[in-house]
Image: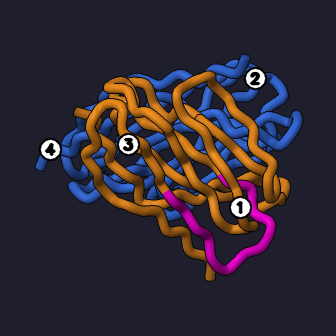
Chain colours: A orange, B blue
C-alpha cells in the first residue's frame, strides 16, 4: 500500500531563518507531488506541484521554493522566512489516472516568530 | 480561473442529517470530490463522483451533483459526533495535469 510521510510535524522558526520541509511517498512510482498551505477560512492553497523529477510548477509567487531530487521525494524550502509564512503545510501525491485522487500527509505546523 | 465556494460553518444535532453544499465555476469539471479533515491532521478522501453522474451513495454518505447549476452536496445521514470535522469540496478540471481546486472547507459541528 502507498504511504506518505512528511516532517517535521511542528517547528518554530525565527524570521529570516531558512526552512526545509521534507516529504516522501512509498509504494508508488512516478506520482504527481504537491505542496499546499492551509490558512483559516481560506481553504487549501496550492503552492507547488511536480509531475516528475526536477519538474516543478509554482502556482503563486512567494518566498518559498520546491525541489524534487528523487522520484518520490518533495522538499519545500525557504532561504529567509517571513512572519506571513506561518501556517499548516500539507504534502500530497496523486497518480496519473483519470480520477486525480489526492492523498495527503499529516501536515506540518510552521510558526515563524 | 476555477473557483469553489462553500459555507464556512454548519451545526447539527446528533442523529440528524447534515447537508454540506458546494458551488463551483469550472464547466469542464470531470470529477468532484469530498474530503474530510479532522483537527490537526491531513485530508482524507471520503468519496468522489464523475461529472456525468447525478448521485452516488456510499453507506451514510450521499453525493448529489447538479451539473447545470454547478452545485455539489454531501449528505451525511444519522450524523455522529465523530463526523465533526472540516469538509472540503474539490473539483478536477480537464486541462493540463488535471488540476484539483479545493473549496474553503465547511466546519461541521455535531451537538450531542
Q: Are marks 4 and 1 on the same chain?
A: no
Name the mark nearer the viewer: 3 or 2: 3
Q: Which element carries disc 3, helix, strand or loop?
A: strand
Q: Nearer the viewer, residue A2 or B22?
A: A2
Q: Badge 4: few (under 14), some or many (20 or more) residues near its Cα, within 10 Å?
A: some
Residue B87: give x, y in percent of width and height: 42, 42
Report the label total. Answer: 4
Q: CA distance from mark 3 to mark 2?
A: 27 Å
Q: Chain of mark 3?
A: A
Q: Is residue B27 above or below residue B90?
A: above
Q: Earlier in the sequence, mark 2 or mark 4?
A: 2
Q: Badge 1: few (under 14), some or many (20 or more) residues near its Cα, within 10 Å?
A: few
Name the mark nearer the viewer: 2 or 4: 2
Q: CA distance from mark 4 to mark 1?
A: 47 Å
Q: Chain of mark 4?
A: B
Residue at the disc numbered 1: A69
Residue at the disc numbered 3: A88
Disc 3, disc 4: CB below 8 Å? no
Q: Which quarter of the rendering shows the N terminus of chain A?
A: bottom right
Find residue B1 and report its image quarter.
top right
Instruction: Give me the residue at 33% from left, 43% from top.
Output: A110
Q: CA distance from mark 2 to mark 4?
A: 35 Å
In the image, the segment drawn in magenta is: A22-33
Q: Badge 3: few (under 14), some or many (20 or more) residues near its Cα, within 10 Å?
A: many
Residue B31: give x, y in percent of width and height: 74, 43
- Tag shown at residue B111: 4
Q: Which quarter of the rendering shows the C terminus of chain A?
A: top left
Q: Are marks 3 and 1 on the same chain?
A: yes
Q: CA distance from mark 1 to mark 2?
A: 33 Å
Amino acid at each position: 500500500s502507498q504511504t506518505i510521510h512528511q516532517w517535521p510535524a511542528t517547528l518554530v522558526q525565527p524570521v529570516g531563518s531558512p526552512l526545509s520541509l521534507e516529504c516522501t511517498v512509498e509504494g508508488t512510482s512516478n506520482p504527481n507531488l504537491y505542496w499546499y498551505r492551509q490558512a483559516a477560512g481560506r481553504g487549501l492553497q496550492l503552492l507547488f506541484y511536480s509531475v516528475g523529477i526536477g519538474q516543478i510548477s509554482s502556482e503563486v509567487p512567494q518566498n518559498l521554493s520546491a525541489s524534487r531530487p528523487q522520484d518520490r521525494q518533495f522538499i519545500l524550502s525557504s532561504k529567509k522566512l517571513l512572519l506571513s509564512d506561518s501556517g499548516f503545510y500539507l504534502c500530497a501525491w496523486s497518480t496519473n489516472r483519470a480520477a486525480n485522487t489526492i492523498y495527503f500527509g499529516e501536515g506540518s505546523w510552521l510558526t515563524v516568530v | 480561473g476555477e473557483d469553489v465556494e462553500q459555507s464556512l460553518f454548519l451545526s447539527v444535532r446528533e442523529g440528524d442529517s447534515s447537508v454540506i453544499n458546494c458551488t463551483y465555476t469550472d464547466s469542464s469539471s470531470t470529477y468532484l470530490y469530498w474530503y474530510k479533515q479532522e483537527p490537526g491532521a491531513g485530508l482524507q478522501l471520503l468519496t468522489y463522483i464523475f461529472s456525468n453522474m447525478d448521485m452516488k451513495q456510499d453507506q451514510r454518505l450521499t453525493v448529489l451533483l447538479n451539473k447545470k447549476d454547478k452545485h455539489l452536496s454531501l449528505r451525511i445521514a444519522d450524523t455522529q459526533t465523530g463526523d465533526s470535522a472540516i469538509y472540503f469540496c474539490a473539483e478536477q478540471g480537464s486541462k493540463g495535469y488535471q488540476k484539483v481546486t479545493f473549496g474553503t472547507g465547511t466546519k461541521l459541528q455535531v451537538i450531542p
